[in-house]
Amino acid sequence: MTERLDGPKVPPAVSAGGPATGPAETPRTKQRLGPSAAVAIAFLLPAALLLGIWVVYPIVYSLIRSLFDANGTGFVGLGNYTTIFTDSGTLTTIRNNLIWVVIAPIVVTTLGLIFAVLTERIKWATAFKLIVFMPMAVSLMAAGVIFRLVYEENPDKGLANAILTTVHDTFASSQGYPEARPREGDQSQVADQNGAVVTKQAVQAGQPVLVPIVGVNPQLVPANAQPAKAPAAGGGLSGTVWLDFTRGGGGQSGAVDPSETGLPGMTVEAVQNGQVAATATTAEDGSFRFDGLPAGSYTVRLPQSNFQASYGGLTWLGPTLITPAIIGAFVWVWAGFAMVLLAAGLAAIPRDALEAARIDGATEWQVFRKITVPLLSPVLLVVFVTMIINTLKVFDLVFIIAPASVQPQANVVALEMWRVSFGGGNNQGLGSALAILLLVLVLPFMIMNIRRFRRENT
Amino acid sequence: MRKGSAAAILAGLALAVAACGNAPTTTQPTASESAPATAGAKTLQGVKLEVAAKWTGAEQKNFEQVLKAFSDKTGAEVTYASTGEDTGAFLGPRIQAGSPPDVAILPQPGLVQQYVEQKALKPLTDAVTAEIDTNYTPYWKELGSADGQVYGVLIKAAHKSLVWYRSQAFDDAGVQPATTWDELVKNAQAIADSGTPPFSLCGASGWTLTDLFENVYLSTAGPENYDKLSKHEIPWTDPTVTTALEKIQQLVGKQEFLVDGTSGTMQTDFPTCVSKVYSTKKSAMVIEADFVAVEAVQSGAKVGEDAKYFPFPKAGDTAPVVLGGDVAVAMKDSPGAMALLQFLASKEGGEIWAKLPGYLSPNKNVSPDNYPDELTKQLGQTIVSAGDAVRYDMSDLAPSAFGGTDGKGEWKVLQDFVRKPTDIKGAQEALEAEAKKAWK
């Protein structure tokens, strides 16, 4: 976890960027004070050796390897790089990385800033900071496992959907028979029409209407349901809505069989020329009757409200939402880190500047915009750039949170690099090319960071 | 991966069951000198052999019993080395160092080709080849061959042409196990009408979808086309593939057929799909191999009572039997290694192994009567009766970039197809494009 190592290094640089006092007081002479060249080399050698083995050599070798094919024997020139930019799979990874780089660092930095500014104002700031910083103590892998559960689609398991459905159900709840469908087939008297069930033929008073419904789990049929009765003819428009399924099979479809139950509580509408002429509700045996309806031909409709499925929340782990969902997990992990750095930066801002502005009559928003943010900008930049680098190399969160079936849609360059190299294809040529691409993407931000360190240290 | 460990657990459970009976307990395989059981010439007295395979736990113990039988017969001293899940990673360095095991058991026939190219395998002697000719159909011989030479023999099989179901769900809907595809679809409709979504597909585990496709394809297109498609000799845009995908479309095209709908299916991996049938009882059927038994038991179902299965129904002219399995190869050209391979390929060796739990033999002369339980007997019977039409898991024969990688190749395209079952043509074109990349 190199990002963790980056972390602690930053604050000293920041505080050095504040009131620069130390170095000026040391006497400067041209005479060499340090150790001799030989000693210097002896001390540098271990570090140089390790860097050479673990950083320089792999980069150079990857560069060479990226010019060869999967077996490592055939020279393909820039072929692997062409593949990266022509293959739709890798293009998706590049697109996803772009989304990551654009969104994640901004959200993390903004949230960190908000938390840092707000914690200055509250009494229990330490407790708050501790809680927000806590996710940093969790490995990214564990964070991935946690969020895999948070985003579980079933609201009984997944926290995100549990919250969504609870909020939603406060305003609207499901009713009726969510999974019910009309009996299918040409023989069936009814058909599905935009979620409602309607009779195929026009019906008239005196002619009993049969509305066969299937697909209702027997456990979901209300306890008060009675065996369905075939409606008697005569006396206004009437009929039966019933569960057209004999447990254990053998029932005749479209006909009321002895063991089949009615579906009570269904709203039934008699429709004429697109207008609802009358409404009725089915009784315990599934029968309904429209009283006082003028003679004529009608369509009987069970409106969609009978079949309203309960709100199940969002498909977080589906192809559309997967990248935002993973970015959410990333923000959860890193917001605390950003907050701590920015809080340290805030503490270093000279109070007098803020107070002067307030005395001059600036509003809090103005103070924040014109004083705090500009004075904090070096730290903001450090956080921002660190986050960009972190997002470019994001791997574990994507690998763990995205189910295998949506990994192609959630894929990022670092994960694709590992996949093509070791995850089955064993094409280490293409993998090396992706590694080099990642290096090229990270490099400008690295250079930026190094320059900043240099400027601040001089 | 998943399949391997599941098989290991299956064997473990089966062993636990058998332990209640009179299963012989094993001693260390190296203790050959202590067991001079059989009479006859011990031609390999003093010869030392090493066998490497991925099996651990109960599977390893069972295999060691077979090795012991070999030791008793020949006098050779055989040691077993477990390669772990990644056989290639174990064997690679050993081959490079010039000290491979005498005999290795490879989990995929694809590795046979790979090692032949590296010249790491020794061709089997005529005696072993003759043994294979007697006991195996020509298809299996070819599977272990490369460039016309026989290098390996399939010694252990996994049966992948099964449909597992929950008997209560079938009783509620009043349906019987289907023997044809149309019947399966009709039953599915009846089960859906009864209020239970009939199928629990493991959409997040791509290999389960390739298994489904392979069964339907073998059944509709027949073994010859299956072989051609396995080698990419006919393109994936072939009309036979269209037919197979149309059949699958009948299952996945209807929301009420899939438990939790399409989006829920795509997030369900193996073994969660099994627990949706046997644990939460939300669904009625799961289409996967014999190792579903392990997960069904873990879900609290009793195999044979609540958890039953029927052979994959005929979607065309062929009753499909798709197997996975392990291939034994010789890495050293020694008489000992060849004798062991001959023993493993023989009726004698197969029957010793068949009496132990968790084993299924592709050897046509190993009678199903040898298997310790009814379930395995039936499975063995389907293999014997399918005869020449038995085929090996197609995706395991393909380059792994096509047939064995999450989010790539056939796995990805079939997942996309389940998501959007109307686009058969698009799926075929995508499959062909992926296949071209993998087979270049």
Image (tube, grey):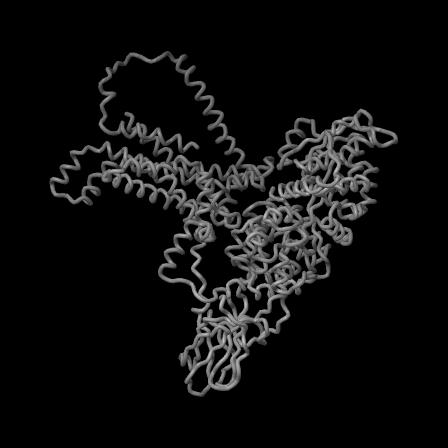
At which x and y percent is residue A203? 49, 83
In the rendered image, the vertical position of residue A346 relative to residue B179, given as above or below: above
Q: Is residue A456 above or below residue B131?
A: above
> Residue at image x 42%, y 18%?
A44
The residue lying toward the viewer, choosing from B149 and A140, is: A140
Q: Residue B356's image quarter? A: top right
Furthest-bottom residue in this view:
A295
Please identify the quadrant where the N terminus of chain A is shown: top left
Q: Please tell me in which quadrant of the rendered image residue B192 appears.
A: bottom right
Taking the spot 24% from the left edge, 38% from the top edge, the residue there is A123
User: In this view of the protein, can residue A440 be seen by the observer?
Assistant: yes
Q: Is residue A142 left or right of residue A108?
A: right
Looking at the rendered image, the quarter that the C terminus of chain A falls into is top left
Q: Position of residue B113 (x, y in %)?
A: 69, 40
Q: Nearer the viewer, residue B241 or B35?
A: B35
Would residue B137 be seen by someone viewing this image from the given angle?
no
Q: Position of residue A430 (x, y in %)?
A: 53, 40
- Quarter of the image where one finds residue B246: bottom right
Q: Residue furthest left?
A: A360
User: Along the horizontal axis of the image, is A238 left or right of B351?
Assistant: left
